[in-house]
Image (spheres, helix red, strand yellow):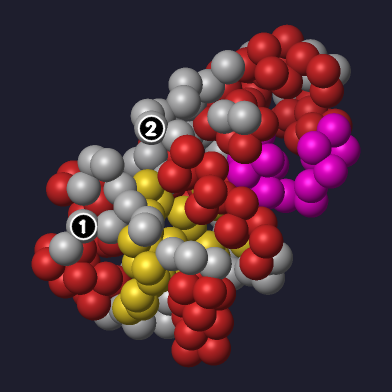
């Protein structure tokens, strides 16, 4: 039976998610803070950690750091009410397998848990998977700067691609439409999911 740690400071969400996971055949326990989560990780191994990013005392970043350094076989799924392109990129670089913004559908998290358990190793990015969406070479270059290099500011992207800031904004608008999202954080999440399918 797969073991899952839920690190979430919102009582209702933490209890509901833990209950749903246990009802779905997993062995789930929970922690209210990043400190509690790390203490649990020190005492026993988990197959998956589902962590919020913003929590009192120490946030999900400390949980992700600990898992990245000491629990290489543990998969991490992030849930957050405060999404940002920077936090999504940071999460990817630390090996997070999925990134959800609140509110999310429980079924989406359960699917992410199933996929994380099925995957035995890190799946490399395959940029060709974006071709069916009609992604242009310039849009692909922009996405690579954001996801692989962690550059999220429009001016810096414009400088790297030798184009105007207004052109960068237009590329983002086009990409939001192609991925059916509204902001950079959601775009990063959608692109990563597609690249790792």
Q: Earlier in the sequence, mark 2 or mark 1?
A: 1
x, y percent for residue 172: 76, 35
Q: Is residue 79 left or right of residue 132?
A: left
Q: Report which residue position mark 1 lands on.
A: 45
Q: Is residue 107 left or right of residue 78?
A: right
Please report the residue visible at 37 percent of the width from the left and 56 percent of the height from the top: 2
* Disc 1: CA contacts within 10 A as few (<14), some (14-19) or many (>=20): some
* Disc 2: CA contacts within 10 A as few (<14), some (14-19) or many (>=20): few
Please report the residue visible at 47 percent of the width from the left and 38 percent of the height from the top: 118
Residue furthest to the bottom in view is 11
Give the prevailing secondary structure in the magenta stretch: helix
| Residue 152 among those drawn in magenta | no
Q: Is residue 118 above or below residue 50?
A: above
| Residue 185 among those drawn in magenta | yes
Q: Is residue 86 visible?
A: no
Q: Give the CA separation, mark 2 to mark 1.
A: 16 Å
Q: Report which residue position mark 2 lands on.
A: 120
Q: Is residue 3 left or right of residue 14?
A: left
Please report the residue visible at 12 percent of the width from the left and 67 percent of the height from the top: 43
In which quadrant of the rendered view does residue 83 lie?
A: bottom right
Q: Which residues are magenta?
A: 176-191
Along the line of sight, the residue nearer the viewer: 17 or 1: 1
x, y percent for residue 32: 35, 82
């Amino acid at each position: 039976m797969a073991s899952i740690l839920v690190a979430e400071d919102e009582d209702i969400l933490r209890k509901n998610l833990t209950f749903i996971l246990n009802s779905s055949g997993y062995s789930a326990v929970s922690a209210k803070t990043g400190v509690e989560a790390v203490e649990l990780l020190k005492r026993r191994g988990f197959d998956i950690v589902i962590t919020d990013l913003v929590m009192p005392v120490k946030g999900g970043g400390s949980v992700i750091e600990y898992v990245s350094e000491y629990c290489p076989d543990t998969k991490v799924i992030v849930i957050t009410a405060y999404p940002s392109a920077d936090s999504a990129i940071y999460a990817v670089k630390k090996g997070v397998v999925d990134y959800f913004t609140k509110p999310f559908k429980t079924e989406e998290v359960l699917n992410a848990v199933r996929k994380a358990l099925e995957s035995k190793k890190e799946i490399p990015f395959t940029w060709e998977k974006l071709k069916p969406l009609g992604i242009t070479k310039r849009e692909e270059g922009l996405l690579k700067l954001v996801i692989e290099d962690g550059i999220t500011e429009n001016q810096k992207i414009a400088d790297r691609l030798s184009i105007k800031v207004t052109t960068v904004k237009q590329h983002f608008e086009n990409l939001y439409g192609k991925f059916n999202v509204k902001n950079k954080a959601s775009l990063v999440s959608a692109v990563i999911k597609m690249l790792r399918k």
